[in-house]
């Protein structure tokens, strides 16, 4: 895979033109070591400083009385400020009807 640029829709909108000029930054994501994992289960836990996102797979069917086992594959720990930005971005994407 190659480097990817952030699209304009993902960048925060500056409040003023002066702010836009003072914070003009080009972001380049290096995805050469990235691993893609599919998840159909997500869970969230939190501490006062961090948000923990847990992802995994439910590979079985719900059987009456049997516990459902979910294999967790990834734990992503982010700061609360990153979590707020993620919420804003996910809300914009979902409201735009892209999914």
Image (tube, rainbow, N blue to C red):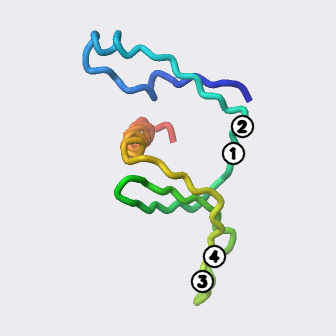
| Disc 4 target residue | 69
Q: CA distance from mark 3 to mark 2?
A: 36 Å
Q: Residues within 10 Å of mark 2 (few under 14, many from 20)?
A: few
Secondary structure found at label 2? loop
| Disc 1 target residue | 36
| Label 4–label 3 contact, CB within 8 A | yes
Secondary structure found at label 4? loop
Picture coordinates of residue 76, whole percent (x, y): 54, 52
Instruction: Please identify, in this view, whether the residue under mark 4 or under mark 2 is nearer the observer.
Output: 2
| Label 3–label 2 contact, CB within 8 A | no
| Disc 2 target residue | 33
**99 versus 17 height, above or below:** below
**Circle number at residue 51:** none
At 45% across and 29% down in the image, what residue appears?
Answer: 10
Side of 81 relative to 37 (left or right):
left
Picture coordinates of residue 94, whole percent (x, y): 43, 42
Q: CA distance from mark 1 to mark 3?
A: 28 Å
Q: Earlier in the sequence, mark 3 or mark 2?
A: 2
Q: CA distance from mark 4 to mark 2?
A: 30 Å
Side of 80 relative to 78 (left or right):
left
Secondary structure found at label 1? loop
At 37% across and 42% down in the image, what residue appears?
Answer: 81
Q: From the image, which quarter does the N terminus lie in?
A: top right
Q: Earlier in the sequence, mark 1 or mark 3?
A: 1
Q: Earlier in the sequence, mark 1 or mark 4?
A: 1
Q: Residues within 10 Å of mark 3 (few under 14, many from 20)?
A: few
Q: CA distance from mark 1 to mark 2?
A: 10 Å
| Disc 3 target residue | 67
Side of 85 relative to 99 (left or right):
left
| Label 1–label 4 contact, CB within 8 A | no
């Amino acid at each position: 895979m190659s480097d990817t640029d952030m699209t304009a829709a993902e960048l925060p909108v500056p409040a003023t033109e002066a702010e836009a000029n003072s914070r003009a930054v080009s972001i380049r994501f290096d995805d050469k070591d990235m691993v893609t994992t599919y998840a159909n289960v997500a869970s969230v836990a939190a501490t006062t400083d961090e948000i923990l996102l847990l992802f995994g797979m439910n590979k079985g069917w719900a059987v009456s009385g049997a516990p459902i086992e979910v294999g967790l594959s990834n734990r992503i720990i982010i700061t609360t400020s990153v979590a707020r930005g993620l919420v804003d971005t996910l809300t914009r994407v979902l409201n735009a009807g892209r999914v």
